[in-house]
Structure formats: C-alpha cells, structure tokens
Amino acid sequence: MKLRLSHPYLLLLVFLLCFTVLSQNSHEGRYLKYIDSAYNILNESPKVAAVYLDSIPEPLKKNIIGHLACYYDLRALISDRNHERLKLYQNYVLALKYAELEENYDVAGKASLELFYNTYLIKKDTSAFKYLEAAKRYYTLSGNKNGLLEVMQMPAYVEFYNGNYQSSNKLILEQLEVYKSIKEDAYYYMYALFMLTSNYLDLGDISNSHKYFKIFKSLEENSTLSLALYKSHLATIYGSMSNLHFKKKNIDSTQYYISQSKELRNAMNEVDRRNFYSLHVDYYDYIKDFEYKNNYIDSLKYFENEVLSKTMDASLNLGDSLLISESELKIEKAKLKNNFKWVVVLIFVLIALIVLFIFKSKKSKKTIKHFEKSNNEYTYLKSNHEKLKVKVRGLEDYISDVKKEIKHISSLDAGVNQRIKIKDLFKNLQLDSSMLLDKMENQLELVNELNIEFFTQLRNGYPQLNDSELIICYYLFVGFKSKEIALFVNSSTRAIEGKRYRISKKMNLQESDLTLADFLNQKFKDTKTEFPQKSRV
C-alpha cells in the first residue's frame, strides 16, 4: 500500500531536507577555514592563530566534527610557541584522544611522540615508552616514513637525556646519512646535528662540537625548516657553549656566546631562559659587577613568578574541564529530550495524515490496508523511541560505574596505591569531554564517598554546618590552602576565608588556640585518608 502525498507537501519536505543539509555543510566548511588559517599563520603569529581557533563556537564536536584532532594539535603548537608546557601536554592528550576516534593516524603518531617527549622530560617516567610504541604503530598505519624516522631518533635522545653522550653519538652517527638524505624536511638532519653538538659539548670535546655546530648553522636558510624551530635549538646550543666556557673560565668566549644568546631570548624555552639568567648571575658575580648581578637576580625572580602564574593558569584550566564536561552532559540530555519531543510530534502528524487518508478513502478494503500499514509505521517509531530510552539508561549506567570506582578506591588501605587510583580517577574526569556527572551530582556527593566516616562524624557532631561548609572542612582536612580551595570550587580566596571564620564560629573555636585546620586534623585524625599533595613550583 502506498501513502500518497500531494505535490506541494512533497516539494516542501524535499526543500526542507536540502536546506538542512546545505546549511550544515556550509557552517562546517566555514569553521574548517579557521583551522586552515590558523595553520598558515602559526609560525608568523601564534596569537593570531589562537584568535582564529577562538572564533570557532561551541560545541566543537558539532561545528568541526571529524577535525577535533587537528584543532587540539594546533592548540598544542600554540602552547609550545608560548612556552606553556602544561597546556601543551593537556592539548596533546586531547589531540591523541580525538585522533584515535577519527582514525587520523598522522596526528595520533605526532601526539604520541610529543607525549613521550614531555612525559619523559618532565616526569622522568619510564611509562612514557608506551607513547613511543604507540607513535610507531600509528605512523606505520598512516605510512608516514618521516614520522617513523623521528621515532627512530628517540633512543639517541634518551641516551642524550640520561647523560650517556657517547652512546647517543654512536646511535646518531649510524643513521646520520639517512637523516641528511631527507631533502623534503631538514628537521631530522637538524635535530641529529643538534644532539651531536650538545653531546660533544657535554663531553668537553670542543673541536667536534664546533664541527657539527658549523653544519647545523648551514641549515639556517633551508626553506624546509621552520625558522622558529631552528632558533629554539640554536638558543639551547649557545647556552650550553656559554656554560662550558664559563666553567673553563674562558671569559672572552663566555661573553661572546652570552651576547649571541641574548639575541635569541624570545626563542628560548623555560629551561634555556632559567639557565640564561642563572649564568648571567654567576658571570657578573665572577667579574665583580654586582649591579648587573642584582639586575639578573631580579629578572630570574620575575621569570620564576611568570612560570608559576602560567602553571596556576594551566592547573585552573584542568580543573575547569570537569565543569565543562558537566555542562556538555546537560546539553546532551537536553538533546535527547528534544529528540523525544520531535518523535511525539511526528507520531501525531503521521496519525493525523492516516486519519485524513482513511476518511477520504472510498473503499473499505483499501481503508483497512491503509490502517494496517499506518499501524506498522507507528510500531517502527515506537521502537526508535525505545532506543532513545536505552541511550538514557546508558548514561545512568556510566554514572553508576563512576560511583562504584569511587567506592572501590575508598575501600583501599591508605597509601601509594590509593593515591595512584585517585589521581587516575580525577584525571579521567577532567580530560573526558563526554557525559560525566548527572546534573543533581555535586562535589559533596563525589568526595563524600571517598571518606564516609569523616562526613558522618562531622554531620553528627555539627549539624549546623551546611553542605558548602562541609566540603570546605574536608578540603582543609586533606591539606588544601584557602587559595587552592578557591580555585577548585570556583570562588575567591576572600570568600573562602569568610566561610572558614563562620565555620570556626559555629564550632565555638574563638576561645581556642587551634586553627580550624588543626582542630579538624586532631579531632578526625583516625578517619584520615591519604591524598596526593599538590606539588609546589
């Protein structure tokens, strides 16, 4: 049985369908242009590249669907240009996550390699080698031969980083001609020369270090090489040469290489800048120029404060990712609810069409057939509605799994294992941009299950405390300062201090010599659950 629609209705439906598809493709193409523009301008102006990316509206999953890996790869490159190490790490984690989902193996290989480099460099963690294996696997899948060559350089880098300079040189020299033969990208040859120069400097072999440094400098005009990348490695070499000559008390040579380093200050990473200021302090102390020495001491202090500020900002962004994930969950739930409404509307529209068709039918047999067909269509729509309900139940199951994991962690004995489990749990919550917490969940419900005994005793002993005061007591109990609590609960330090005063007043601690934190630690020490302490920069 065929359901006939008049031509105007049919044309209207076709027009709406085409308009929706074209509109969606137009918007997506428009935002993808921002990614291309950011790539093109990145080397000249990272700030402008960031403006292009900031112009892509939320939700990113909808507006640049299938290109999130490239988006976060760009974010990581911008963080690298701005010397923001923590943001770089975070963006490469997200780039790897979406590259795997989108099967973008080139970006997945690059992100894995960068995560290896940063994890091994910063944390000195041997677990970083899993990223190196992943990079090799992804580059093999994409057929990226140059990427595999970069993976091949990493064992030499590991030896270099661990101070095994002769072993590092041996590995590099065995493949040096291979790196040199890659004419389409001089990076691999440049990086090999950089390690050779640095290794020989650390070995005190000035002759060989100058030999390979001369070849390194010959690549400055190579069009296949990023000038910013070249300068950053050049700054590191000049810094190493300055240090070597200063140790040998070759003051004239030291002064020359220091002057060369000054011209590359903007290309230096955090390590190079710290060494740059420290060397100037030692140099001017040696030549008894105490005025300049004090100036560089001030510069070093300013630099350390700048690094601390960037680190705090990056930590705040990591904390904010949890709130963003919660917002995305609400959006997804709203979409499901909206889709359900549309299903209901479509059902009523179909029923109305069926009823209209039945009343216009002239033959009872034809009317019965039409009714049976309409009934089948209704059953099909009802089945789709059940699928939507299954999706909602899937969200609830995910939330239940998170709760079970929290209960499992709280049952473990306090110690290293528990700290690792808690770190992993919070990391997953922060980095997952999908559905995490139900809208009725809050921080009190989350941490309450990590130390049930503490909250039970605190509620029973001080029923006058509200939920926000209970959570502040808990953060003080596990060792957070007011400033850290303010960052975590998205409030101000002054507001937290005010709440601490009101809590002390409710607990009648005014006449006691104990602070609120000391009181909580003494009274509830038997319930103490060992948490990982926040590192100090």
Image (cartoon, rainbow, N blue to C red):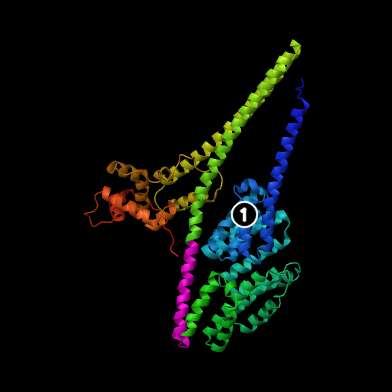
Asked whether residue 169 is in view, the answer is no
Q: How far across and down, in percent of the image, does residue 508 sit? A: 24, 49
Within the image, what quadrant is residue 263 found in? bottom right
Residue depicted at 34% across the width and 46% down the height: 454
Q: How far across and down, in percent of the image, does residue 131 sit? A: 60, 57
Instruction: Tell me the amino acid under the disc marked 1.
Output: Ser
Residue 18 belongs to magenta span: no
Within the image, what quadrant is residue 202 found in? bottom right
Residues drawn in magenta: 285-311
Residue depicted at 47% across the width and 64% down the height: 309
Q: How far across and down, in percent of the image, does residue 511 sit? A: 21, 54
Asked whether residue 242 is in view, the answer is yes
For this orientation, the residue located farthest to the top is 364
Task: Classify the position of the N terminus by image quarter.
Answer: top right
Identify whether 358 is placed above or below 258.
Answer: above
Nearest the viewer among 285 and 53 is 53
In the picture of the structure, the residue carrying the numbered disc 1 is 55
